[in-house]
Image: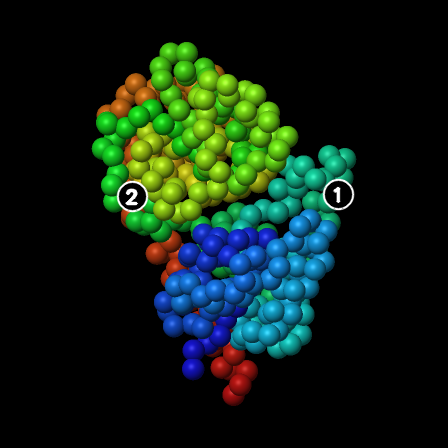
Amino acid sequence: MPCRVAHLTSVHLPTDTRIFHKQCKTLARAGYDVTLIAPHAAGDVERDGVKVKAVKPSCSRTERFTNTIRSVYFAALEVNASIYHFHDPELIPVGVLLKMHGKRVIYDVHEDYTGGMEVRQWIPKSMRGATALALNFYERLLARSCDRIVAATPIIANKFWPDRTRVVCNFPLKDELRAPESIPYDQREPVVAFVGALGDARGVRQMIEAAHIVSRQTPVKLMLGGPPLASGARASFEAKNQDGLVEFLGFLSRPEIADLFARARIGIMTPLATRNAYNALPTKLFEYMSAALPIITSDFPLYREIFGSVKCGLFVDPESPEAIAEAILWLLRHPADAAQMGRNGERVIADKYNWEHEADTLLATYAELQSLNSIRLQ
């Protein structure tokens, strides 16, 4: 009988790339009986061998921290899995309770949550430092009860205990974002693509200003894909975009992202200098590279270390629209060099920075926990 496992989230969509498309589908293909418990208004479904068990989506942060977490916990008990793998720090108490029921538990740390406190708009600035310290204490104290910590980057892994921590990076699937009808690079329109959260910390305002600077010298289109903007932010965005230079695409499915990349000339991600950005392995940059797009990104030490030797793009001061504009202009005016940068990035994804390599670590982690269960039953 296959080992039953459950992934838990109170925050992410049931189609989340790391959780569903990479981890859950990998486990299902390896023969595990996989259930994903997640907020989903459309109810229970089954996709690609993964059973999605829905909980009611929350309408507010308060409701999420109360009703949604409670619903996730009771749904987890109902599934009665052998291994539970949860993806949000707010679910650590759920993990502790599941351990009390004799279950094996994995905490998947997607980002440096304590570092991320400095850009959380819903926390008053005067309280962000204290909130970060409290979260760090809470995370380390309660995470001790987990059998394994799965960290999305080596820097995140350094916060936890080496004997039980495994690094499973969020690298792209090799061919997922290569559209079959990709337009030859030298025939593409001057489209600069960004996909991700459209917040100030991501440097979106500087990107928009840079696009307007570029447009004074050559045609350009900045296409932004991401979750819908709040009404106030959307109004501000539209007021600055009377010329239609920037196009907001809204949330994009994975095939829609592939289609965007297939007609873009540049992939851009220029986050501002926050602790979280410094410590992150920026998934979107790897995804641009997998689609053979040259990249423009922030000139941070970690980014230079990873991408500099690959020669797959340009580094800029993320606070400077002028610097970003200069990089866009250079790539648009040197299409042969830009295309070569794209090929360089695509090659290193195929050889090294891909999910297929990370899947082996994930499966080995689950095999370790199954072995511990077998020893306990003897």
Residue at left 35%, top 56%? 356
Q: Can residue 90 be seen in this view?
A: yes
State the colouring used for the structure image. Answer: rainbow
Residue at left 56%, top 21%? 239
Mark 2 to mark 1 CA distance (whole Å):
46 Å
> Mark 2 vs mark 1: which is more N-terminal?
1
Residue at left 61%, top 55%? 57
Q: Residue 168: which quarter of the image?
A: bottom left
* Quadrant in which the N terminus appears: bottom left
Q: What residue type is labelled 2?
A: Ala
Residue linked to disc 1? 130
| Mark 1 residue crowding within 10 angstroms, few (<14) / some (14–19) / many (20+) | few
Q: What residue type is labelled 1?
A: Ala
> How far across and down, in percent of the image, does residue 173 sit?
35, 51
Q: Nearer the viewer, residue 338 or 54?
A: 54
> How far across and down, in percent of the image, does residue 61 sit?
69, 49
Give SS at disc 2: loop
Residue linked to disc 2? 179
Relative to 338, say whether 353 is above or below: below
Q: Residue 185: which quarter of the image?
A: top left
| Mark 2 residue crowding within 10 angstroms, few (<14) / some (14–19) / many (20+) | some
Residue at left 54%, top 39%? 228
> How far across and down, in percent of the image, does residue 11 sit?
59, 53
Q: Can residue 151 be seen in this view?
A: no
Give SS at disc 1: helix
Relative to 29, say whether 123 is above or below: above
**Horizontal placement of 135 versus 211: left or right?**
right
